[in-house]
Image (tube, grey):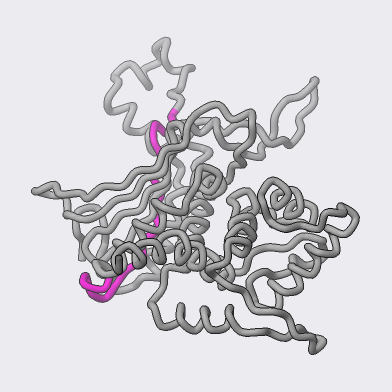
Amino acid sequence: MKLDNAFVRRSDIERSQELADSFERVDWIHGLGRYALRVNPLLGQGEVLDPMPYYWVTAQSEYSTDILFRKRADLEELMPRLCQYSALYFSASDVMSFLGRKLTGRFQGEVVSDQREVEIRGSRVPGRRVKHRMKFNWIKMYDKGTVLRVETVINNPEEFRVRRRVRRQGRDVMAWVPLRKSVTLLFRYREISAQSNVRYLDALSQVQDPTPAVRDLDALTTNASTKDGRTVRAFNPLSRNERMLFEVLLAGEHALHGFTNRDVRQKLGRTSYPLAPNEDRQPTQVTRLFRRLHAHGLIAKIPRSRRWRVSLAGRRTMSTAIKLREVAYPALFAATA
């Protein structure tokens, strides 16, 4: 069953996905070339245009990931929370990391996020939309009927890279080079967009039903035990120091490759977090923090490395703790005045 440009009901989802995945493997040059012969009568007649085939390009790429809900009411209840969370907590560095980029001082451009309610009559279905734009590329989320859609749009592919064979100093080598608009590179468009959508949905995964959130809050505020039986202190989600620690761990630049002891020390050093005055003792202090965070399931070790990453449960719990302090508590305090 189709609604506008979305399928809200499918009899065979696996088969539908197979058809969608085959899109990048179509011989577009051959297929589009046949259409060109029908449009341009000078082709295929031995004229001067025959040795000059068309260079087919992708003017704009849109790749979406759809989540189907059984009932429209369920999505309508969840959508405001998703929009609010993405607008409040997705920073410029987060948006860059969703798109596989890292925000550095050399970045020249702007990252803009906005949300609005779509109330267009006719063929379009009313709903909500959140859009995060990085120069001429963006990722957006909107609802349509019973479908929650996350969509990555690429207008300027040169912001991304593709590994391909190129000519360097008279030799053919494999290298990461700027992505071009040729239709032969649609496979890379799909890789970039699919990964972007997954990262975005992963970041939204902590917007859950209240029941598991309450259980997580109980676990966070209760002492935990390490694998060797040591007891570690609980976290206070309303504490200013805990909020600074959580914000450092949730920084968008850590989404791709995780973080090290040194990364966290440097970021905490730029805040008012109470690090040890003696710099020689700070690595041990952060190591104890990691042990405490790990015991509560907020972070996980990346195998065969010295890096850590925020767990799915940790991202959900720490983000909620920040919101509790910065948004929910002030609102409730003002409401009871």
Apparent side of residue 47 relative to residue 78 in the rendered image (left or right): right
Please give the name of the residue rendered at 64% of the width and 31% of the height, measured from the top-left corner.
105
Q: State the count of labels.
A: 0
In front of the other: 11 or 205? 205
**On screen, 313 above or below 152?**
below
Provide residue 309's location: percent of width, then percent of height: 68, 63
Provide residue 148's location: percent of width, then percent of height: 32, 62
Provide residue 265's location: percent of width, then percent of height: 76, 53
Q: Quadrant of the C terminus?
A: bottom left
Q: Is residue 66 magenta?
A: yes
**Residue 187 seen in this snapshot:** no
Apparent side of residue 78 relative to residue 72 in the rendered image (left or right): right
Apparent side of residue 97 relative to residue 61 in the rendered image (left or right): right
**On screen, 282 above or below 314?**
above
Please give the name of the residue rendered at 40% of the width and 58% of the height, measured from the top-left corner.
85
| Segment tinted magenta in the rendering | 56-74
